[in-house]
Image: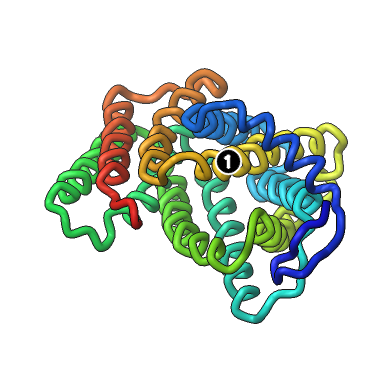
């Protein structure tokens, strides 16, 4: 069977169908909400596993491994064409740079603060995007609820690293930009081609930082295996699950389910990393979850 490149030309048979199609058949047997929840669990377990790598290769080295292996897997799966117009390349480059910076900032925060708190603060980025431009008075309530969650998070912070919180905010800002650029990527590319190319650009952004920080430590066999596992759990599997879920459910429902991510991150952090949160911080996480779900529920189908 032949595939179509980004520019619509026939490229002949590729291995993509044996990999992506078989995965698609497996995912197709699962209900869409289960796909979303499985993706959330996968990405948070991947983040928890990444934290164990920090002692060996640092946060930059871990990001470099994650993005490099994720890019390699996605490029092999989709075999995207490089023949694109200047506008499309601009979008792909913007997407990749944003993705790379988002991961660098997030892992820098993860090295300093608990997983649940890092994800909760980072989640403010997409929440702001969801609320931006809204004309509903109810969305003011969701904004106030999220702000209250941030206040509770700060009051229960104890000895939380301020720099870690700032990195999480920076990651959230990049996440908001990532959503906007990702929408443009979807308009200019087809299937997983834009994602694969964008991930390759993100890897080019992150790898120099990782090499500068960790050097030859990145080449240890166990580190490479662990890095591949982080890439699969944090990028390849959840992104593939999300794409399949979005084909079969309204984006509004998808957004509501994704709102569970901060709570899942706090739970995974507790179970895998033994990172316990103060009771006020758990309430803060739930406030952000509720605000995000409410904002997503009120999003119009056209959006």
* Residue 272: x %, y % from top left: 56, 21
Residue 273 located left or right of residue 25:
left
Give the image quarter of residue 295: top left
Judging depth in this view, the residue of 118 and 87 nearest the camera is 87
The residue depicted at 44 percent of the width and 32 percent of the height is: 116
The residue depicted at 55 percent of the width and 61 percent of the height is: 186
Give the number of callouts.
1
The residue depicted at 79 percent of the width and 50 percent of the height is: 72
201 to 33, vertically: above or below: below
* Residue 25: x %, y % from top left: 69, 33
* Residue 162: x %, y % from top left: 40, 46
Judging depth in this view, the residue of 50 and 133 nearest the camera is 133
Badge 1: residue crowd in 10 Å (few <14, some 14–19, many ≥20): some
The residue depicted at 61 percent of the width and 26 percent of the height is: 29
Q: Is residue 213 visible?
A: yes
Judging depth in this view, the residue of 58 and 4 nearest the camera is 4
206 to 226, vertically: above or below: below
- Please name the residue that numbered disc 1 is placed on: 244
Residue 250 located left or right of residue 140:
right
Q: Is residue 262 visible?
A: no
243 to 51, vertically: above or below: below
70 to 91, vertically: above or below: above
Residue extending furthest toward the left: 137
* Residue 236: x %, y % from top left: 67, 42
Residue 125 located left or right of residue 18:
left
Give the image quarter of residue 231: top right
Label 1: element kind: helix
């Amino acid at each position: 069977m032949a595939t179509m490149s980004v520019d619509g030309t026939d490229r002949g048979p590729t291995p993509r169908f044996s990999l992506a199609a078989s995965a698609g058949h497996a995912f197709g047997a699962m209900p869409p909400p289960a796909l979303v929840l499985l993706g959330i669990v996968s990405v948070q377990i991947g983040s928890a596993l990444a934290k164990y790598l920090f002692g060996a290769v640092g946060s930059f080295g871990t990001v470099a491994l994650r993005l490099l292996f994720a890019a390699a897997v996605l490029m092999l799966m989709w075999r995207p064409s490089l023949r694109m117009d200047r506008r499309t390349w601009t979008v792909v480059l913007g997407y990749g740079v944003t993705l790379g910076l988002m991961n660098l900032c997030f892992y820098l925060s993860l090295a300093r603060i608990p997983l649940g708190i890092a994800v909760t603060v980072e989640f403010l980025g997409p929440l702001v995007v969801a609320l931006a431009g809204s004309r509903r008075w109810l969305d003011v309530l969701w904004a106030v609820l999220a702000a209250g969650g941030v206040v509770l998070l700060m009051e229960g912070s104890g000895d939380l690293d301020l720099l870690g919180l700032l990195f999480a905010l920076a990651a959230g800002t990049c996440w908001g930009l990532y959503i906007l650029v990702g929408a443009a990527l979807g308009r200019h590319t087809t299937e997983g081609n834009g994602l694969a190319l964008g991930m390759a650009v993100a890897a080019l952004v992150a790898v120099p930082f990782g090499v500068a920080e960790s050097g030859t430590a990145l080449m240890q066999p166990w580190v490479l295996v662990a890095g591949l596992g982080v890439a699969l759990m944090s990028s390849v599997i959840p992104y593939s699950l999300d794409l399949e879920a979005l084909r079969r459910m309204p984006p509004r429902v998808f957004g509501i389910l994704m709102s569970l991510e901060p709570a899942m991150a706090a739970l995974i952090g507790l179970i895998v990393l033994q990172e316990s949160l103060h009771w006020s911080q758990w309430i803060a996480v739930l406030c952000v979850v509720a605000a995000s779900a409410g904002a997503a529920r009120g999003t119009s189908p056209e959006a």
